Image: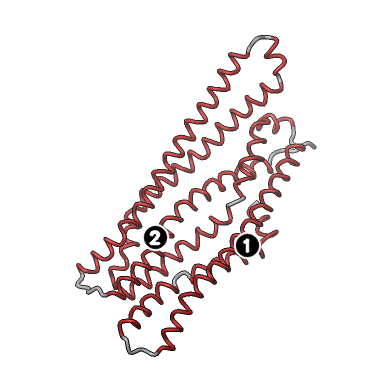
Amino acid sequence: LKLSILQCWWPLLALASTLHVIEVALQFVSPVLIKMIVRFIDARDGRLFLGILYAVGYFMAPLLQNILSCCFVIHCRRLGMRTWGATSCMVFEKSLRLSQPAAASYGPGAVTNIMQVDSARFDFAFFHLNFIFSMPLMLVLGVVLLYRNLGIAAFTPLLVMGVMFPLNKMLVKRLMNLSRETSIARDARIKVLMEVVHAVRLVKMLAWERRIMDLVRQMRDAEMRRIARFKAFEVLNGLVWQGMPLMLPVLTFGAFLALGGILDTALVFSSLALLDMVRIPMNLFPQALQVVIQVKVGMDRIEGLLSAEEIQ
């Protein structure tokens, strides 16, 4: 399935990724120009032409970045909706050709869930797929520019990420397992519900409404317990990664002063802007990782169905 998607739409994916890389690079123009503008103002004897050039660059960089960001969003949405529609059609056509043993092993609930839930995950998948490689790149660029300002203290964000890596690895592994368990529980609940709908006349004749309602409620409660555990780990993962950026300015400037550095206005403003850039990948990367994990689980389920035995 992965190779099929790439073979069909690799030009669109390559265009979106290229636009995104340029957009990420342009985000660092403003923090660099801040330092130049502040030093130009402090100098008071600089050439007016340079000041105008800095101001125009400070205005044009965010403008171009926003234009490229809009193009990136449009292309990713087009790619996501095409993939969603194509996989839904493939799953539907495959469900009509399943052999009796394969159809019995999946049941109507699993097929419906794969078509409606797992295929729909492709809608925003390509945004986060780009973030998986662009956010580390953005972090590295931010640290390199910070190193020019703060020296060795600029590696504080990387040190913080290294310390938190074992915890993040554990959370990602747990999220993947919980995503699989939630999908299995959802399949079981939809299967029971579909069987009840098909046999509703028999249920009414035998007055089994209360028993069936209790059975469906039990299945739903089991599914909700797994969803609640999944969301709890999502919140914990977000808390870890969104809490760390709040500490970065204190830790980074503290390390810089402890190593004997001297702060000035241009250095502080430029470094704060770069630290804001470093916060973006630290916030977005875990979110992108969670979405990619769910897409990976859904893709495995779609591939399993598409490779199931067909009617001869």
The disc, 1 or 2, on the residue closer to the chain's N-terminal end is: 1
Of all residues, the one furthest to the right in this rendering is: 312
Image quadrant in which the C terminus is located: top right
Q: Is residue 120 left or right of residue 178?
A: right
Q: Amino acid at mark 2?
A: Arg
SS class, disc 2: helix
- Say if 220 sits above or below 67 in the image: above
Give the x, y percent position of residue 110. Answer: 64, 34
User: What residue is drawn where x is 39% and y is 49%?
Assistant: 168
* Quarter-of-image position of residue 12: bottom right
- 127 or 62, which is in the foreground? 62
* Quarter-of-image position of residue 17: bottom right
User: What residue is drawn where x is 71% and y is 14%?
Assistant: 202
User: What residue is drawn where x is 74% and y is 34%?
Assistant: 99
SS class, disc 1: helix
Q: Please give the label number shown on residue 13.
A: 1
* Quarter-of-image position of residue 173: top left
User: What residue is drawn where x is 49% and y is 67%?
Assistant: 24
Q: How is the image coloured?
A: secondary structure
Disc 1 vs disc 2: Cβ atoms closer than 8 Å?
Answer: no
Q: Please give the label number shown on residue 49.
A: none
Q: Residues within 10 Å of mark 1 (few under 14, many from 20)?
A: many
Which residue is denoted by mark 2 in the rendering? 279
Give the x, y percent position of residue 35. Answer: 36, 77
- Say if 1 sits above or below 117 in the image: below
Give the x, y percent position of residue 144. Answer: 38, 72
